[in-house]
Image (cartoon, rainbow, N blue to C red):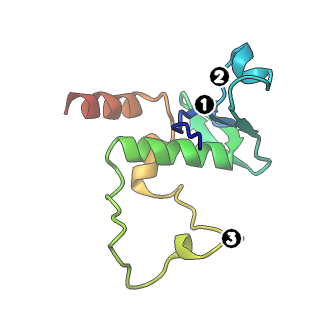
Amino acid sequence: YVSELLYIHSKLMIVDDTRVIMGSANINDRSQKGDGDSEIALVVEDTDIVKSTMNGKRVMVSRFATSLRRKLFREHLGLIEPQWPHQRSKEPDSFMHPAPHLNDNEFNLREDDLVADPISDETLALWDGAAKK
Protein backbone atom coordinates (compact mmCIF):
# COMPACT_ATOMS: atom_id res chain seq x y z
CA TYR A 1 0.00 0.00 0.00
CA VAL A 2 1.48 3.33 -1.10
CA SER A 3 0.21 6.64 0.17
CA GLU A 4 1.28 10.22 -0.35
CA LEU A 5 0.42 13.28 1.64
CA LEU A 6 -2.09 15.58 0.03
CA TYR A 7 -2.34 19.26 0.76
CA ILE A 8 -4.21 22.17 -0.74
CA HIS A 9 -2.09 24.91 -2.26
CA SER A 10 -4.63 27.21 -3.82
CA LYS A 11 -4.48 30.66 -5.30
CA LEU A 12 -7.09 33.29 -6.05
CA MET A 13 -6.90 36.25 -8.41
CA ILE A 14 -9.76 38.70 -8.87
CA VAL A 15 -9.11 40.95 -11.86
CA ASP A 16 -10.82 44.36 -11.87
CA ASP A 17 -13.91 42.80 -10.25
CA THR A 18 -14.68 41.20 -13.63
CA ARG A 19 -12.85 37.84 -13.70
CA VAL A 20 -11.91 35.30 -11.06
CA ILE A 21 -9.09 32.78 -11.43
CA MET A 22 -8.93 30.21 -8.65
CA GLY A 23 -7.24 26.90 -8.15
CA SER A 24 -3.89 25.32 -7.48
CA ALA A 25 -2.22 25.62 -10.90
CA ASN A 26 0.93 27.70 -11.19
CA ILE A 27 1.92 29.57 -14.31
CA ASN A 28 4.75 27.24 -15.30
CA ASP A 29 5.24 24.21 -17.55
CA ARG A 30 4.81 21.69 -14.72
CA SER A 31 1.31 22.92 -13.93
CA GLN A 32 0.17 23.99 -17.39
CA LYS A 33 1.24 21.08 -19.62
CA GLY A 34 -0.91 18.56 -17.80
CA ASP A 35 1.67 15.79 -17.57
CA GLY A 36 3.43 16.85 -14.38
CA ASP A 37 1.85 18.24 -11.27
CA SER A 38 -1.76 17.42 -10.51
CA GLU A 39 -3.00 21.00 -10.60
CA ILE A 40 -6.26 22.59 -11.60
CA ALA A 41 -7.63 26.10 -11.94
CA LEU A 42 -10.72 27.69 -13.32
CA VAL A 43 -11.61 31.06 -14.76
CA VAL A 44 -15.01 32.53 -13.93
CA GLU A 45 -16.33 35.19 -16.30
CA ASP A 46 -19.81 35.99 -15.00
CA THR A 47 -22.37 37.48 -17.39
CA ASP A 48 -24.41 39.04 -14.55
CA ILE A 49 -23.06 42.59 -14.74
CA VAL A 50 -23.66 45.20 -12.01
CA LYS A 51 -22.68 48.82 -11.39
CA SER A 52 -19.82 49.52 -9.02
CA THR A 53 -17.11 52.06 -8.27
CA MET A 54 -13.39 51.72 -8.86
CA ASN A 55 -10.94 54.53 -8.14
CA GLY A 56 -13.92 56.85 -7.69
CA LYS A 57 -15.35 56.13 -11.15
CA ARG A 58 -18.53 54.24 -12.01
CA VAL A 59 -17.75 50.93 -13.72
CA MET A 60 -19.58 47.78 -14.75
CA VAL A 61 -18.32 44.62 -13.02
CA SER A 62 -19.21 40.96 -12.63
CA ARG A 63 -21.59 40.24 -9.73
CA PHE A 64 -19.65 37.09 -8.77
CA ALA A 65 -16.19 38.69 -8.87
CA THR A 66 -17.13 41.85 -7.01
CA SER A 67 -19.21 40.06 -4.36
CA LEU A 68 -16.40 37.53 -3.75
CA ARG A 69 -13.79 40.29 -3.44
CA ARG A 70 -15.99 42.39 -1.17
CA LYS A 71 -16.81 39.45 1.09
CA LEU A 72 -13.11 38.52 1.37
CA PHE A 73 -12.19 42.14 2.13
CA ARG A 74 -14.89 42.31 4.83
CA GLU A 75 -13.75 39.02 6.31
CA HIS A 76 -10.06 39.98 6.42
CA LEU A 77 -10.81 43.45 7.79
CA GLY A 78 -12.93 42.06 10.62
CA LEU A 79 -16.19 43.51 9.26
CA ILE A 80 -18.03 40.17 9.40
CA GLU A 81 -19.10 38.70 12.71
CA PRO A 82 -17.44 35.33 13.40
CA GLN A 83 -19.66 32.40 12.49
CA TRP A 84 -19.26 29.26 14.56
CA PRO A 85 -20.58 25.89 13.41
CA HIS A 86 -22.38 25.26 16.69
CA GLN A 87 -24.35 28.53 16.51
CA ARG A 88 -27.92 28.04 15.43
CA SER A 89 -30.01 30.76 13.89
CA LYS A 90 -33.60 30.91 15.04
CA GLU A 91 -34.85 31.74 11.57
CA PRO A 92 -33.28 30.47 8.34
CA ASP A 93 -32.07 33.16 5.97
CA SER A 94 -31.42 33.03 2.24
CA PHE A 95 -27.93 31.61 2.78
CA MET A 96 -29.38 28.43 4.32
CA HIS A 97 -31.47 27.44 1.31
CA PRO A 98 -30.02 25.07 -1.31
CA ALA A 99 -29.26 26.19 -4.86
CA PRO A 100 -30.74 27.46 -7.13
CA HIS A 101 -32.30 29.80 -4.52
CA LEU A 102 -30.66 33.24 -4.73
CA ASN A 103 -28.90 34.55 -1.64
CA ASP A 104 -29.73 37.99 -0.31
CA ASN A 105 -27.88 40.85 -1.96
CA GLU A 106 -25.20 42.10 0.44
CA PHE A 107 -24.30 45.13 -1.69
CA ASN A 108 -26.32 47.54 0.44
CA LEU A 109 -24.77 46.64 3.78
CA ARG A 110 -22.84 49.44 5.50
CA GLU A 111 -19.80 47.15 5.79
CA ASP A 112 -19.99 46.37 2.08
CA ASP A 113 -20.05 50.07 1.19
CA LEU A 114 -16.77 50.46 3.10
CA VAL A 115 -14.99 48.06 0.69
CA ALA A 116 -16.99 48.65 -2.52
CA ASP A 117 -14.21 50.72 -4.12
CA PRO A 118 -11.07 48.59 -3.64
CA ILE A 119 -8.60 51.42 -4.25
CA SER A 120 -10.34 54.33 -2.53
CA ASP A 121 -8.55 56.21 0.23
CA GLU A 122 -11.19 54.99 2.70
CA THR A 123 -10.62 51.31 1.86
CA LEU A 124 -6.85 51.74 2.01
CA ALA A 125 -7.23 53.40 5.43
CA LEU A 126 -9.22 50.36 6.60
CA TRP A 127 -6.40 48.05 5.45
CA ASP A 128 -3.78 50.20 7.16
CA GLY A 129 -5.82 50.28 10.38
CA ALA A 130 -6.29 46.51 10.36
CA ALA A 131 -2.58 45.96 9.70
CA LYS A 132 -1.61 48.08 12.70
CA LYS A 133 -3.77 46.05 15.10
* Residue kind at label 3, given as amino acid type: Ala
Q: Is residue 15 above or below residue 67?
A: above
User: Few, some or many C-alpha atoms within 10 Å of disc 1 (few <14, some 14-19, many ≥20)?
Assistant: some
Residue located beneath label 1 in the image: 13
Q: Quadrant of the N terminus?
A: top right
At horizontal 66% and vertical 48% (from top left) the residue drawn is 64
User: Few, some or many C-alpha atoms within 10 Å of disc 3 (few <14, some 14-19, many ≥20)?
Assistant: few
* Residue kind at label 2, given as amino acid type: Asn
Could you tell me residue 62's position as x and y percent?
Answer: 70, 44
Disc marking residue 99: 3
Separation of marks 2 and 3 at Cα, in angstroms: 31 Å
Tag nearer the camera, 2 or 3: 2
Q: Earlier in the sequence, mark 1 or mark 3?
A: 1
At horizontal 64% and vertical 43% (from top left) the residue drawn is 65
Quarter of the image where one finds residue 61: top right
Disc marking residue 118: none
Residue located beneath label 2 in the image: 26
SS for dot 2: loop
User: Few, some or many C-alpha atoms within 10 Å of disc 2 (few <14, some 14-19, many ≥20)?
Assistant: some
